[in-house]
Amino acid sequence: MGNSHYRGMYIFYLNLINIILSPYFSYVCTLGFSFGRSLTIGLGVATGTAIYHYFNQPAETPPYGPPPHNNALERRSANENCTICWSRLSGDRDGLYTLRCGHTFHHRCMEMWLNIIRICPTCEVSV
């Protein structure tokens, strides 16, 4: 965030230097010095090149890592509730339906749910 503030100041001062020095070099050019006009053009090109390279340098990315591991989300227990009907999930796996995302529901609840909408009711991932 602070870096963009300094970039703005950098551009401001480069433009200010260009504005201040351009009339001087134009004046030198009118006196008959041949290097005045080319120096003015060169200053403009140098300013533009500096701005181009300053903004096209790779941005610093903050160090991101994987999200913190939460064991509570992965625990499956016999007293877990179905998020569709809020009834307890039974211990037998025959009456349960597990989606690819890993969430488990009653088989009949999931059949009714998937007839209406094709997303997981817990994490909203497309099924």
Image (spheres, helix red, strand yellow):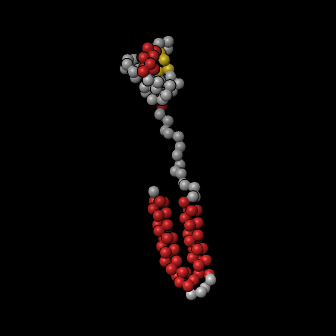
Residue displayed at 39% across by 17% down: 88
From this view, report whether residue 47 is shown above or below residue 24: above
| Image quadrant in which you'd find residue 108 | top left
* Closer to the camera in the image, 58 or 21: 21
Residue displayed at 58% across by 58% down: 57
Looking at the rendered image, the quarter that the N terminus falls into is: bottom left
Residue 87 is situated, as x and y percent measured from the top left of the image, at 37, 17
* Closer to the camera in the image, 35 or 46: 35
Residue extending farthest to the right is: 34
Residue extending farthest to the left is: 86
From this view, report whether residue 38 is shown above or below residue 12: below
In the picture, measured across the screen, residue 100 lies left or right of residue 90, that is right
Residue 34 is situated, as x and y percent measured from the top left of the image, at 62, 83
* Closer to the camera in the image, 32 or 65: 32
Residue 102 appears in view = no
Residue displayed at 45% across by 16% down: 111
* Closer to the camera in the image, 87 or 113: 113
Residue 73 is situated, as x and y percent measured from the top left of the image, at 46, 29
| Image quadrant in which you'd find residue 89 | top left
Residue 123 is situated, as x and y percent measured from the top left of the image, at 45, 29
From this view, report whether residue 51 is shown above or below residue 65: below
Residue displayed at 49% across by 63% down: 7
From this view, report whether residue 3 is shown above or below residue 82: below
